[in-house]
Image (cartoon, helix red, strand yellow):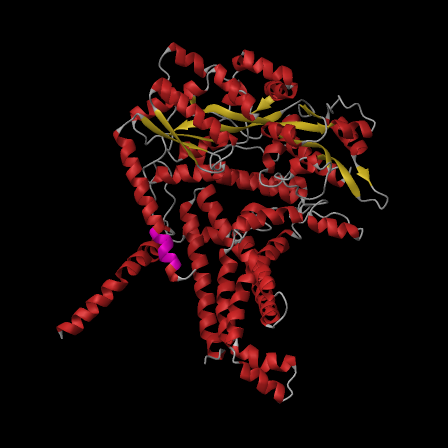
């Protein structure tokens, strides 16, 4: 009996440091944010007072919030499928034996190891009108220069492109690892049966990659709501909020306007959105993923 | 991020907080050391200048000023205000002059007047250019001391002027001339693509600042001195915005859409634009990188000449100990003597903040060798306070969004400004 007890105590002691950090830096701030969202912002000598759902009501009538939410939806719909498809394509491509495959894998992975701020600064010059890389190439075909980041029609699209470019290489690594786990006997069996390359991918590789796809999908979806570093460099959310994403808006409200209560309410909404995404993904898709 | 990474990161933060706490403890024991948040990224020539000032001051006054390089203006105020809220602010910091109302509303700073006791102190406080003091005073009190201040000026490429048949020594003096010159300076290739634009007034990030040049020239004043009323839809403001938009859409001498502030000097060096509006703070940058002779001029006049001021002031934080605040005041007074203000201006390109600094031998030599440096000074008599109100960044954002909406063509200027006015006054109603 004492032995079993001490076993339990040891176990709890072992997880205690991790639990303490998790509680201190994740659970407690989340809870505090939730509570703060029902209070007003303390300003100087005016302390916070309880305002109930006021912050949430304000959110409903805040056009910038709706714009940010809509932008974020487009950003997610743009980045998630594109980066996953690109990652899969690159992984299948560099999985085959070909000359210089290490160099190729490195090239695909490079964007991931670069800091986002540096990446964004490079892309800033790609997008520069007239002498930026993009316009120089288009100029060869006689096209007019275009203010890529300065137009509300293309700015969000540019922000999506940078995010996909940054993420695809990272997801490729997961797919590559998963592809190498697939036993070569399956490929041999498939070729004996006379299966085409496409059939082999669709009937063998793709189903076996499903757990990886789920993992990558969850990550990509979460990143779509978490990745805003490049917005700071490329557009500052402009022009006229065309590239304002939810997290960027939270930063603005919290650390530029110092309206911490409203920022807390926005954060709660973002947390709920993320929780919903995770629930749907694990509830619906996991059942269809094939684990060995 | 997996959990292990997370714990590692959290541990590092915890450790960082612990050391920060320990150093603040040491600070509280002796007023012979004061912390000083300065807005610049680590490294570079400016940090060397600031370090040298701190070392010199320590020799003279035996107070160690500890500069903490905190990143951009925005990052610095975030750090200073969060530290203030945690009860452990820096003793002094250089922050944007426009953040004055925000700092007052957060009850974060003390008036400079509290430390002004002797006649010498009083004379010192009166020695700055009045244009700079407009952004440093409200409600009869002085809250900030001008330090690294700037205005907007026009840079022009003399070679491009010559090629276009213009007198390379004569910049545009009026709005009409500005359009006329820009038309001559805009070059198109055989297929009609523009290879060189006449002029660029950047509109990313903080378009309100450059726009305030135009509104001042249109004889419109955007806000009151108490910072609780704005006039964003006055006729002069609409007229100014229409002029800006017409440069691109009607006259086609300005690149379309929102133009990037950060790459504007580069556009100028690359000869993609022949004239640009930007801060005097870019003077040293242009001097180093322009491969052609260039001129610097006051902004052209509409109904009258005009430009906003800009840049950073010294503030003293409320929660610092009285002895530390006194030491900070001494440092601020020391670093803004005529000689040091002159040296700082010559070393950085900022406008020396007091008239007598321009009478020092060092400054006279500098201006004799580089007359462009005096343009910003001469423009000061036409300068107005930079747009600043209570809840400053929120009101400014509403204004910026309206300007960008008009520039991208999403809304007509009058409509965009009318909406901005309504929203700004709604935000400001709590400060009446």
Q: Nearer the viewer, residue B64 or B24?
A: B64
**Residue occupying the point 51% across, 70% down:** A177
Within the image, what quadrant is residue B107 found in?
top left
Of B185 and A58, nearer the camera is B185
Residue that lies at the very extreme toward the front in this rendered image: A99
- Relative height, residue B373 to residue B213 (above, below): above
- Residue B275, position in %: x, y? 71, 31
Say if residue B125 shows up in the picture: yes
Q: Nearer the viewer, residue B234 or B114?
A: B114
Magenta span includes A262: no
Q: Position of residue B71 (x, y in %)?
A: 47, 38
Which quadrant would the C terminus of chain B be assigned to in this image? Answer: top left
- Looking at the image, the residue that sits furthest to the right is B190
What is the span of residues highlighted in magenta in the rendered image?
B5-11
Q: Quadrant of residue A27?
A: bottom left
Q: Is residue A23 left or right of residue A148?
A: left
Location of the N terminus of chain B by quadrant is bottom left
Q: Residue B422: where, in percent of width, then height?
A: 56, 40
Q: Is residue B9 magenta?
A: yes
Up-down: is B189 above or below A68? above
**Residue A72 pos. (x, y %):** 54, 57
Q: Which sits in the foreground, B392 or A238? A: A238
- Residue at 81 percent across and 25 percent down: it is B166
Q: Which residue is depicted at the point 48% across and 67% down? A: A218
Q: Is residue A90 above or below residue B69?
A: below
Report the magenta stretch's main SS. helix
Would residue B10 be found to the left or right of residue B94 on screen?
left
> Residue reaching furthest bottom?
A193
* Left or right position of B33 against B180: left
């Amino acid at each position: 009996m004492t032995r079993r007890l001490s076993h339990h105590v040891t176990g709890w002691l072992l997880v205690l440091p991790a639990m303490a950090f998790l509680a201190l830096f994740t659970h407690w701030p989340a809870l505090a944010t939730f509570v703060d969202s029902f209070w007003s912002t303390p300003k100087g000598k005016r302390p916070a007072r309880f305002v109930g759902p006021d912050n949430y009501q304000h959110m409903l009538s805040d056009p910038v919030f709706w714009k940010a939410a809509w932008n974020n939806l487009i950003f997610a719909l743009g980045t998630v499928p594109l980066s996953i498809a690109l990652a899969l394509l690159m992984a299948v491509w560099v999985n085959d034996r070909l000359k210089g495959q290490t160099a190729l894998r490195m090239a695909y992975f490079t964007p991931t190891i670069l800091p986002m701020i540096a990446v964004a600064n490079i892309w800033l010059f790609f997008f520069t009108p007239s002498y930026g890389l993009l316009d120089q190439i288009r100029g060869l075909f006689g096209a007019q220069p275009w203010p890529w980041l300065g137009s509300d029609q293309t700015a969000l699209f540019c922000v999506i492109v940078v995010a996909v470019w940054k993420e695809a290489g990272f997801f490729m690594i997961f797919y590559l690892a998963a592809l190498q786990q697939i036993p070569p006997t399956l490929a041999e069996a498939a070729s004996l049966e006379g299966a085409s390359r496409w059939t082999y991918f669709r009937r063998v590789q793709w189903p076996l990659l499903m757990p990886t796809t789920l993992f990558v999908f969850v990550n990509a979806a979460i990143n779509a709501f978490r990745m805003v570093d490049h917005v700071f460099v490329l557009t500052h959310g402009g022009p006229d909020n065309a590239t304002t994403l939810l997290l960027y808006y939270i930063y603005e409200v919290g650390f530029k306007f110092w309206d911490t209560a409203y920022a807390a309410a926005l954060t709660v909404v973002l947390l709920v959105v993320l929780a919903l995404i995770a629930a749907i993904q694990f509830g619906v898709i996991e059942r269809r993923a094939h684990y060995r | 991020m997996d959990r292990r990474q997370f714990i590692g990161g959290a541990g590092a933060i915890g450790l960082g907080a612990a050391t920060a706490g320990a150093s603040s403890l040491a600070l509280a024991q002796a007023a012979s050391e004061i912390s000083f948040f300065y807005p610049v990224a680590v490294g570079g020539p400016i940090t060397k200048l600031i370090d040298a000032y701190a070392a010199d001051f320590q020799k003279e006054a035996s107070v160690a000023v500890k500069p903490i390089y905190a990143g951009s203006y925005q990052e610095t105020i975030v750090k200073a205000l969060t530290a203030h809220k945690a009860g452990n602010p820096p003793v002094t910091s250089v922050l944007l002059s426009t953040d004055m109302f925000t700092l007052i509303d957060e009850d974060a700073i003390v008036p400079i007047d509290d430390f002004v006791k002797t006649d010498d102190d009083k004379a010192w406080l009166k020695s700055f250019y009045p244009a700079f003091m407009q952004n440093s005073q409200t409600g009869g009190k002085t809250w900030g001391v001008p330090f690294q201040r700037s205005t907007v000026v026009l840079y022009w490429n003399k070679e491009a002027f010559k090629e276009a048949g213009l007198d390379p020594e004569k910049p545009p003096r009026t709005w009409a001339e500005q359009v006329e010159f820009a038309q001559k300076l805009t070059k198109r290739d055989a297929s009609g693509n523009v290879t060189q634009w006449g002029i660029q007034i950047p509109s990313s990030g903080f378009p309100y600042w450059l726009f305030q040049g135009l509104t001042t020239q249109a004889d419109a004043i955007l806000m009151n001195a108490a910072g609780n009323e704005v006039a964003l839809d006055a006729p002069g403001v609409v007229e100014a915005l229409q002029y800006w938009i017409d440069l691109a859409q009607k006259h086609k001498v300005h690149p379309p859409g929102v133009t990037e502030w950060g790459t504007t000097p580069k556009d100028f060096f690359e000869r993609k634009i022949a004239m640009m509006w930007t801060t005097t703070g870019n003077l040293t940058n242009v001097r180093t990188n322009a491969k052609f002779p260039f001129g610097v001029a006051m902004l052209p006049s509409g109904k009258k000449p005009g430009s906003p001021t800009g840049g950073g002031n010294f503030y003293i934080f409320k929660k610092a100990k009285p002895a530390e605040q006194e030491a900070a005041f001494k440092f601020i007074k020391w670093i803004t003597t005529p000689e040091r203000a002159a040296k700082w201006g010559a070393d950085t390109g900022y406008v020396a903040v007091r008239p007598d600094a321009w009478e020092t031998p060092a400054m006279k030599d500098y201006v004799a060798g580089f007359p462009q440096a005096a343009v910003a000074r001469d423009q000061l008599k036409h300068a107005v306070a930079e747009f600043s109100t209570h809840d400053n960044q929120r009101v400014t954002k509403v204004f910026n969004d309206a300007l960008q909406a008009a520039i991208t063509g999403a809304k007509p200027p009058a409509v965009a400004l009318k909406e901005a006015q309504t929203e700004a006054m709604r935000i400001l109603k709590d400060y009446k």
